Amino acid sequence: MNLVRLIAFLRNRLKTVVRIGLAALALLVALDALPGLVDKEHAHTRAEHLPAFWAVFGFVGCVVLIVVSKWFGKAGIMQREDYYDDE
Amino acid sequence: MSELWLHPALILLLGALLLPLVPGRLRPGWLMLVPLLVFARVWAMPSGVFGQVQVLDWTLTFGRVDALSRIFAYIMALMTGIATLYGLHVKENGQHMAAWVYAAGSLGAILAGDLLTLFLFWELMALSSVFLVWYRRTPQSLAAGFRYLLVHMAGGVSLLAGIVLHAQAAGGDLAFNLFDVKHPTLGAWLVMIGFILNAAVPPLHAWLPDAYAEGTFNGSVFLSALTTKTAVYALCRGFAGLDILVPLGVIMALYGVVYAVLENDCRRLLAYHIISQVGYMVAGVGMADLDTPLGQLALNGACAHAFAHILYKGLLFMGCGAVLHMTGQSKFTELGGLWQKMPWAFVFTLVGGLSISAFPLFSGFVSKSMIVAAGFEQHRLWTGFLLMLASVGTFLHTGLKVPYFIWFGQNRCKPETWARAKEAPWNMNAGMAVASALCIFIGCYTPYLYRMLPYPTDFQPYTAYHVSETLQVLFFTAVGFFLLLKKLTPEPTISLDTDWFYRMGGRAFLRFAERRAQAVDNWVGELYRWAGLIPLKAAAFLVGLFDNHVIDGLVDGLGAVVRAVGSRLRTAQRGALQESLTLAFAAVVILVVALLLLF
């Protein structure tokens, strides 16, 4: 099946895929910093004019969500699967 | 004018009713024809008020067609067709019938012009949808279905009480229009509680992940589309601009995301993301002060997001449902590495994941941004930023965690799971393909969706700034995901939620009641022993004595009978006591409801 072969092709070249991904990230931030290209008039707050504001927001938000949720879960919310079973 | 108006729900109900009579060979055709007819009927409905019926003092309006009800009816009819196609190979008529009656309830509620008709169809939805959970036929689904039903009945009572109070204050006017959101009355609050229970606003949300994760593989597709979004419609209609909905919506959006981090069952994770996504809509409704252009933008956003959400969430439930159907597993700890076995299910689920994450060129991008933009432009900065944070969580789970831990990652499949896994039947893939195509079409060609919105809009999602903002947020979320992959490794746990209170509370009540009942019961039993059994025994003893002396053997039997009658009397009394206790509780409940209705 073609689809399987395509995924296998990409998986065999994981390093290259990751490199391309990282390059895309750098390019994205660089393009955003170019004043002529991305019109920051649409920004709502001052902070958004900082270069790579949303990149930092995405990364920090992701880390905070994972850490806080895991802490919340370990504080007693996560229980073994048969929690409700025993009478 | 009302004589010839054909209610689309009626087509579905008749279609469901006739389904058992359709011969086997024509069944797939019938299953596709009926939703198509319903969709055509909804599409061709002219605007106006139809189907008015006079009952006692009330005028019931079955068909109020305007831009708001039309867009919701359109997407419900469309999704009914897609979900039926997805479950086309299901042999059991009852499952299709339950789904169609449920969809008919949703259409009826959306087109209802008065509160009584709304309530009627609202309850029809609850009663029919529970079968989509029960048909899974596991002990867990049976219990989850009962909890689902009880919670919805409670919501229904609140809704009905609110309707009665509201109608009384309004001099018997039952019309379903915007409530006075600046000065809500008690009746309005009760109606709102009924609505937000169905919209799964915390803390009234726990029924949703509880039931949707236990539903059948195709039943949950219907469930994910209909109940919460019908409630969003009702909120749009009745409570646009009610300020409290903004914080509630933001809390919802983040609540669902936090629980999704902890979740091990992929369909329960998706269910928590329904709560999160409906949070955007609820916040949008709260911001929708309809006298202002920005409020209209917010309401447009809520409707557009509901429309897009039904398609991509249905698609996600179809993708995970396909995995469940083909492998029998839905837990991340029992799956992994399936890309070789089910590549198409992966692609479709990924399309759903990218749509829900609001990737440019996918449907979520053009709908979610309306709500977030309305928030920022109304200078609700906290709302805007927190909704952006919820977007981060959405991509983290639905765009990354679900595809990664099912189709890639460590292969945790048991040998039998692995052997079973293969691509889903053609009709399931066709259903997913249609939904995927629509998700991409909506994302690429905005006029299709924007023209259906209740207010005319020139909203432009594809600005360089917005695209750049979104891509940065999403790509750097992905960086965070891969860096913290170890922390996200699924664990075989469940997460306690607010259903704990009624699941454990119910048990505590039962134990308490049992002990009390037992005590009274024992006492009554004891009384019988003293007053009944002991004299009887004594009588038996005397009879025995007499017997020894007079008629050997014959009366021995009589003594045994008397003793047996005595103990029988005792057990019978115990049974009756529990019965009367139940009856007493029922009477109290009925009395409370009656009092609520009368005063």
Image (tube, rainbow, N blue to C red):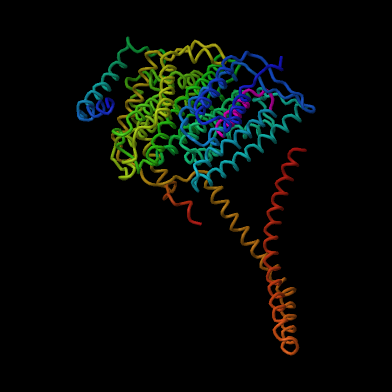
Residue B169 lies in quadrant: top right
- Residue B344 shown in magenta: no
Q: Is residue B599 visible?
A: no
Magenta residues span B98-115
- In this rendering, position of residue B254 left or right of residue B518: left
- Expressed as whole percent of the image width and height from the top left, the position of residue B399 reads 37, 29
**Which of B67 and A32 lies nearest the eye of the viewer?**
B67
- Residue B106 shown in magenta: yes
Q: Residue furthest right?
A: B57
Look at 75% across and 41% down and name the residue there.
B594
Q: Is residue B70 above or below residue A12?
A: above
Look at 27% across and 27% down and name the residue there.
A1
- Expressed as whole percent of the image width and height from the top left, the position of residue B490 reads 35, 42
- In this rendering, position of residue B478 left or right of residue B150: left
Q: Locate the C terminus of chain B and report the quarter of the image it occupies.
A: top right
Residue B423 lies in quadrant: top left
- Expressed as whole percent of the image width and height from the top left, the position of residue B26 reads 51, 27
Q: Is residue B2 above or below residue B319?
A: above
Q: Is residue A51 visible?
A: yes
- In this rendering, position of residue B494 left or right of residue B587: left
**Which of B223 and B157 lies nearest the eye of the viewer?**
B223
- Expressed as whole percent of the image width and height from the top left, the position of residue B323 reads 38, 36
Which secondary structure type mostly characterizes the magenta part of the structure? helix
**Which of B182 and B584 lies nearest the eye of the viewer?**
B584
- Count how many numbered circles sit on residues in the image: 0
Q: Locate the N terminus of chain B and report the quarter of the image it occupies.
A: top right
